[in-house]
Amino acid sequence: MEPDPTTFDYTRPFSLTEWVEAHRHELVPPVANKQVYADSRMIVMIVGGGNVRTDYHDDPREEFFHQLKGDMILRIRDRDGGSPEDLVIREGDVHLLPPHVRHSPQRPDPDSVGLVVEYQREPGELDGFEWFCGECNSLVHRVEVQLEHIDRDLPPLFDAFYASGAARTCGECGAVHPSPLD
């Protein structure tokens, strides 16, 4: 097996298939991603399946998706609320998502694997994470963050939202957003 590219010379090719297998145990919900390269201007990550995400990501930059194994659903919604739309990204498919399209990657198959590439954020360039009401489609909660290490920064955001009954309660209709912690 080649050396781990997160600690080795970036110019050497390596087997992505072997890298995925070596890091499979880290590709667990709720986000299920692992950055391939540390200290790069690009965020290159592998995302495993079996996730339970209910948030929508508002990325200030484009995101590139390549589904390596299995299928995924990219649930998107417009900025004004409304009902979500599911885009199926099948094994072998690629998709380039424009900036600020609210999206919620769904990978119900625990064996699925995707490659996602994003740009690192400039200082002050914030990512948003939003949760919508399942009853009336209103925005329930939004948090903005300066992402530095996407695989480490997201779990605490999700944990804080799911642990707060107030954050999960819709201001429009009073419905409570479900939590995987319940």
Image (spheres, rainbow, N blue to C red):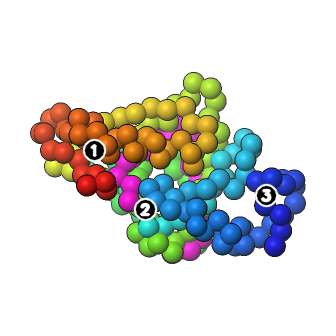
Q: Which residue is mark 1?
A: 132
Q: Earlier in the sequence, mark 1 or mark 2?
A: 2
Q: Inspect the image, locate mark 1, and give the three-letter code of the amino acid beneath it.
A: Phe
Crowd class of label 1 (few under 14; some 14 to 19; many from 20; radius 10 Å): many
From the top left corner, tell me how far across and down residue 138 is, in percent: 22, 40
The residue depicted at 80 percent of the width and 53 percent of the height is 7
CB under 8 Å between callouts 1 and 3?
Answer: no
Alpha carbon of mark 2 to alpha carbon of mark 3: how far? 25 Å
Residue 96 picture location, percent across and down: 56, 53
Q: Earlier in the sequence, mark 1 or mark 3?
A: 3
Up/down of 120 relative to 104, above or below: above
* Mark 1 and mark 3: Cα distance apart in space: 38 Å
* Quadrant in the rendering for residue 182: bottom left
- Of the two numbered discs 2 and 3 on the same chain, state the one appearing first in sequence: 3
- Would you say residue 70 sits in the magenta stretch? yes
Amino acid at dot 2: Asn
Name the residue tied to disc 3: 5
Q: Residue under label 2, please give it.
A: 51
Q: Secondary structure at mark 3?
A: loop
100 relative to 79 in the view: left or right: right
Q: Measure how far apart labels 1 and 2 are at the Cα level.
A: 18 Å
- Can you give x and y, in whole percent of width and height, for residue 106 in the image? 41, 61
| Residues rendered magenta in the picture | 51-72
Q: How many marks?
A: 3
Sort mark 2 into few (<14), some (14-19) or many (20+) by Cα contacts within 10 Å.
many
